[in-house]
Structures are given as C-alpha cells and as structure tokens.
Amino acid sequence: PDDWKGVGSAWLLPKPDEAQAVHFGGTLREFWHDGHLHIVNENSTTVLAVPCDMVVAGYDTDHVNTLRLWDARSTRPVDMALFSRGEYLKASEDEAMAETIAKVLYPEDNHYEGKSLRLKQQYFFVSATVQSIVTKHLETYGTLKNFHEKNVIQINDTHPALVIPELMRIFMDEAGMNWDEAWDITSRSVAYTNHTVLSEALERWPQQLVETLLPRVWQIIQEIARRWQEKVENFFHDPSVTEKMAIVWGGEVRMANLCVAGGLSVNGVSGLHSEILKKDVFKNSYAMEPWKFTNVTNGIDHRRWLSEINPGLDGLVRDLAGGDDYLLHPQALKKLDAYADDAAVLKRLDEIKWQNKVKFADYARKAQGVTLDPNAIFDVQVKRLHEYKRQLLNVLHIITLYQQLQDDPNCITRPHTFLFGAKAAPGYAVAKRIIHLINSLADDISHDPRCRGKLQVVFLENYRVSLAEHLMPASEVSQQIS
C-alpha cells in the first residue's frame, strides 16, 4: 500500500470542515413537487471524503496552487455492541471498508470485488472533487448558471469520466435545473484528454455494476446514451456506426464514448496521436463533430527536470543562454544552437554527463547494492511496463548482443549498461513475466565472465519520481520504442 499520509504528510493540511458525502448503492424514490420531478437516493452507504490540501508554490510568483487529495472515512462509528461482545473486527468493518477506497490505487480488477472497488474509487474522487468545486463556485457567485464560464474540468484519460453524469446530477437534483440547461452547462465545462489509442485503456464498465453501485448516475448515463444514440442515428443512418459510437451497448458502459459525447473538446498528447484519434479511434465522432478535436502536445517542466535535478547542465545553460532567463522563457534555450559545433562547450557537456553518471552509480550502489561502471553507455528504458511499450523488444535485442558476445568476445568495444525501471499493474501476468525475464537475463549476464566490462543489465527497483530525478541526468540513450 502507498502510505501517502505517512510519508510527507507534514505538507498535507486536512480540512475536515470541507468534507463531502459520497453515496453508493441504495434505492431511488421519485416524487413531484412544485412542478418538478425530485429524485432522492435512500438507504445508500455514505462515505465521507475529507480533503487533504498541499500548497504548491510556483517559480518567481506570488501565486500558489492547491493540490487537493482525498481521504476516505466511514460515517458510521464503531459498533460498540459488537465491540463489547468481543467481535472487534466486525465492529470496525464499516470503517475498514470505507478506508479501503483511498488505501490502494489501481487494485487488481480481474474479479468482481476489484472492479467494484475501482469504480468506487473513481466515483469517490470525482464526486468529492466536483462537489468541492461546486461549493466554492456557489460561495463566490451564488449561482451555477455561469459555472461553465468559470470552470473547466479536464478528464485525464477515462478514469474521471463519471464527472459528466455527476455534474448533471448536481445541476438537476440539487440546483433544480432541467435536463437541457444542465446538459448545456456540463458539456461546456468538461474536456477530454486521451492518452493512448489502446482499446484496454478506453474503459468499459459492466452495466450491472454501475446500476447497483451508482443507481442515480446510471439513470443519467442511460439518458445521455439515449440522446447521443439518437443524434448518431440521425447523422449516419448506419447501425454499424451506431454500435461503435454507443455509450451503453452489450451490457457495458463505454467511458471513452461518454467523454467524447459530453465534452467540449477531445485532444491527444502529440500531433501524431491526435491525428490517429481523428482518423481511427474516434473517426466517426470526428466526422460528426470535427470542431471538438484538437491537439495539446505533452511538454516537460524544464524547471523541475533540468534546473532542479541537473545543476551542472543548468550552470552550462545559464553561461551560454544569458543567466536564468530560460527558467521563465524557455525559448531562450534556442541560443544553445550557436554552440552545436563548439569543441570547448561539447567537452564541458561530456564532463557534466560523466559527473552525473558517477553520482548515479553511487546512488544505485547505496539504494540497490548494484555496481555500475560510469564508463559504460547508460541505455535507459523507464516507463510503465506494458506490452505496447515494448520492453520485450529491448530484451530480445540484449539477448542478441549476449549471444554475439559468446561467439565473439570482441564484438562489444564500449561497455554497455541497460537500465530498466517500471511500474506494472498487479494482475498483469505478461508484464510480470517480462520483469522476470529481465531479471533472469541480468543474473545470467552478471555471472558470465565473458560479459564483464562489456555488458550489464539492471532492473531498478520501485521506479518513481525520486529515482527518476537521479537517473535522468545520467541517462545517455533513452529508449522510446513504443
């Protein structure tokens, strides 16, 4: 478990007075009052979302941003009757179940309980966050009719897709809006970023699970799906297209189609990626609503990933590009082009890289007990362990080198160290086998005297940002083979 409150919690400020109630299950009661249909969720399980805020300072500015994390708490106290009878675990059952929501992110989901917990997590974070945004908006403006003018909620991959029906629920059930007004505001308040074209990343939830766990949200999804399907049918008049674009189909809720239907824009994270979305993944949606599709290329925070973690390179950049101007105006980095063939600058660059490699070798020895040779080429592949990231292709390349080395001990003239680092989903069997293969190969190579001083493979344990901060400045070859 990622004990996110235990480590570094000195910077987290709990705000129990801003806690939000999130409801699961229960039954719906409908009644008419003052000419409006009212829907009340009864007998639901309520989990309290308690915000824990971290203030994040910017560079050379008076402004700060707030990173809001959510902790899950039970609304039911410990059952003292059970506790008094010695049934201690049962007495704390509700508390334990509520806290499970925020304990482990991405639980194994190849069984019903795992799927249920994942959906609970997604709705818990979405509902708490949206309620929090709405509360603050109302405090400031006193109305939700201008919500879309003041807020944009980015759906970062399909995981927060439930923000669409949740906003609709709040606008209709709590603010008393009719469907058309609520939909107009919702569809102008959310935008969708797609991060991968892989079908398994475009989440699909079993209809029965959504219906049981989130009965009111399910009602709203059904109506969104019905109206969207009608729109698609009227545009294409093609049942095969309707099936592809449907939000609810074959007993499943398709979250990517919900995001496209309910958002004001859809973007990929590179020019090529966004074109694939238009021409392949969402081609029918693009044909129907081309104005929604745009591109936002992923960037790198150079203040964090150059200035903060690579002081040697930062010093060189400041000398060549005129001080620290590049920190606020990254275009200043273009001044480096003038030194592309400057032997003295290239020599200094080599020296900086060498020092970074020595530092990383020292870190790897202390952290993992591995000995790295700074003279070797550091060939790095660190990213999510996944078939489409093709770590396996890299491993097959290393095996080929290993076999060549056995036939010809002189085929490698410069020592070569392959460094892997990754996270993998706990139930991803193929990923685990690839990790096993990498480590087995690393072990074989480390015990083969023919490889000494020529070939090395290391799988870096527990890859995370703090490890990346040490590794990136020392990296020489960055494997991008997805």
Image: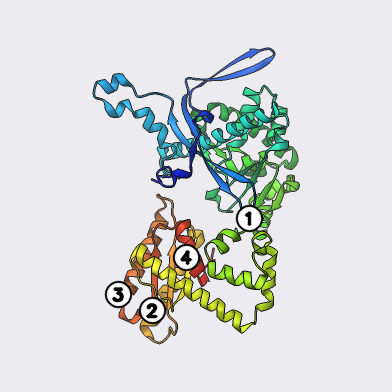
Which secondary structure, mark 3?
Answer: loop
> Distance from label 4 to label 3 (Cα)?
25 Å
Label 1 packing within 10 angstroms: few (<14), some (14-19), many (20+) = some
Amino acid on which the number 1 mark rests in the picture? Val
Amino acid on which the number 4 mark rests in the picture? Leu
Q: Is the residue under label 2 in contact with that under label 3 (CB below 8 Å)?
A: no
Which secondary structure, mark 1?
Answer: loop
From the viewer's perspective, is the residue at label 1 or at label 2 nearer?
A: 1
Q: Is the residue under label 3 in contact with that under label 4 (CB below 8 Å)?
A: no
- Which quadrant is the C terminus positioned in? bottom right
Mark 3 lies on residue:
447
Mark 1 lies on residue:
269
The picture places residue 109, in percent across and down from the top left corner, at 43, 43
Q: Earlier in the sequence, mark 3 or mark 2?
A: 2
From the viewer's perspective, is the residue at label 3 or at label 2 nearer?
A: 3
Amino acid on which the number 2 mark rests in the picture? Gln
As drawn, 273 above or below 52: below
The picture places residue 435, in percent across and down from the top left corner, at 39, 61
> Distance from label 1 to label 2 (Cα)?
39 Å
Query: Is residue 385 visible to the viewer in this orientation of the structure?
Result: no
Which secondary structure, mark 4?
Answer: helix
Q: Nearer the viewer, residue 329 or 153?
A: 329
> Distance from label 4 to label 2 (Cα)?
28 Å
> Distance from label 3 to label 1 (Cα)?
42 Å
Amino acid on which the number 3 mark rests in the picture? His
Q: Is the residue under label 1 in contact with that under label 3 (CB below 8 Å)?
A: no
Q: Is residue 282 left or right of residue 311?
A: right
Q: Earlier in the sequence, mark 3 or mark 1?
A: 1
Mark 4 lies on residue:
471
